[in-house]
Amino acid sequence: MLMKAWLKLSHHRHSGRLRPHEHTSYAPLIVLLFVVGVILSAYTVYAATPYTGPEAGSVALNGTVPKKPPTVAATITKPSNGQHFSTSPVEVAGACTKTTLVEIFKNSIFGGSIPCDDTGHYSISVDLLYGKNVLVARVYDVLNQAGPDSNKVTAYYDASAAQGDGLSSLNFSDTQLLLNTDAVFRGTFPGQTMAMPVQILGGTPPYAFNTDWGDSKNSVYSRKNNSNFNATHAYSKPGTYQITVQGTDASGRVAFLTVAAVVNGQVTPVSDISGNSNNAQSSTVVTKLLTLWPLYVALVSIVISFWLGERREKKMLANHGFLVSSQRTF
């Protein structure tokens, strides 16, 4: 009895209605999904756009910063002045200013070009003309501005005494084979096909040519006559390369030409001029992106389903009077 006195049960009268409760906030989710969808769409379109490359119509913008041309001339220390030779080509070497390009001329005819090395020196093989050769070295900066000429060195190629004082013009007979180019140096970018014009002077056709591009790759050409042609190549890495062209005519005469090639910029893995390698990479990226789209659509569908479900649940509870109205609405 004492226990009953202590315990008193009080029955709580329930209204039968549900108290307001918190629902999922869908507004931030919808905004987040929208942003993700925009980013995913933009990146997919970008990756699916075919690579055209510089050779297929893009525009390259080049800018130069004005600067003074080189003021220090290169020097020729080899060969010695008045030296005679019975074979050609010969080594022409000397001192120069670092970061400049050294061009060698023989009787005012271009003989080759080579970058000045990190020690401030250069060395290049130059084909001599029959007879007397007046050698001059001239430096150029990165803007192709010429500096002063070097000291003049006279060298003699004694293969043909009939040439006397030496040739001073490119118009001569087939007594000697020479190679020339209007490209003092060739500038290009990784993956781009570079063309170097080669001019055949003298000799007896047909001709055979081997071009060493300086990157462990060679190209072989043949010509039935002395018409000019372009030697083409695409470098895969940036850097400075020494191109050497060796030509041989039907009589066994041999001629050499050395030209510097400067490859600027970062490596662009282009397998050919149309950019097939880049298109293949883009195709791989697109494939990976397409696997994300089903996941994105499924996620959007789930969010919409939950939102519709909660809306339906609230409406049913409100219609049956089980849900106390709340000031918060979605």
Image: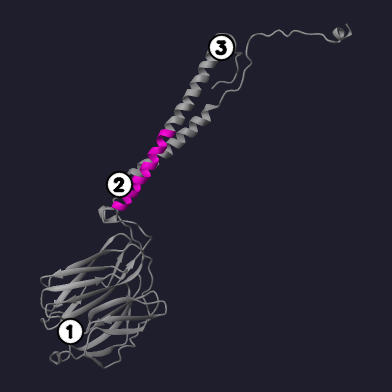
**In this rendering, does residue 242 appear at all?**
yes
Of tags 3 and 1, the one toward the viewer is: 3
Helix, strand or loop at label 3? It is: helix
Can the viewer see residue 46 in this picture?
no
| Image quarter in which the C terminus is found | top right
Q: Residue 157 or 219: which is nearer the viewer? A: 219
Q: Earlier in the sequence, mark 3 or mark 1?
A: 1
Q: Earlier in the sequence, mark 3 or mark 2?
A: 2
Q: CA distance from mark 3 to mark 1?
A: 106 Å
Q: Quadrant of residue 179?
A: bottom left
Q: CA distance from mark 1 to mark 2?
A: 52 Å
Mark sitting on residue 50: 2
Label 1: how many Cα within 10 Å (few below 14, some 14–19, many 20+): some
Residue 90 is left or right of residue 324, and the answer is left
x, y (%) of residue 116? 37, 77
Marks 1 and 2, the one that precedes in the sequence:
2
Give the magenta range.
Answer: 276-295
Q: In the rendered structure, which amino acid carries the disc numbered 3?
A: Ala
Q: Secondary structure at mark 1?
A: loop
Residue 199 or residue 170, whichever sits in front:
199
Give the number of callouts. 3
Q: Which residue is mark 1?
A: 168
Residue 324 appears in which quarter of the rendering? top right
Q: Position of residue 44 (x, y in %)?
A: 37, 41
Q: Residue at x 44, y 30 (%)?
A: 298
| Mark 2, secondary structure of its residue | loop
Q: Is residue 285 magenta?
A: yes
Residue identified by numbered label 3: 318
Q: Give neighbour class at mark 2: few <14, some 14-19, many 20+ (Cα, 10 Å).
A: some
Amino acid of disc 2: Pro
Please provide percent x and percent y for residue 305.
Answer: 47, 23
Residue 175 picture quarter: bottom left
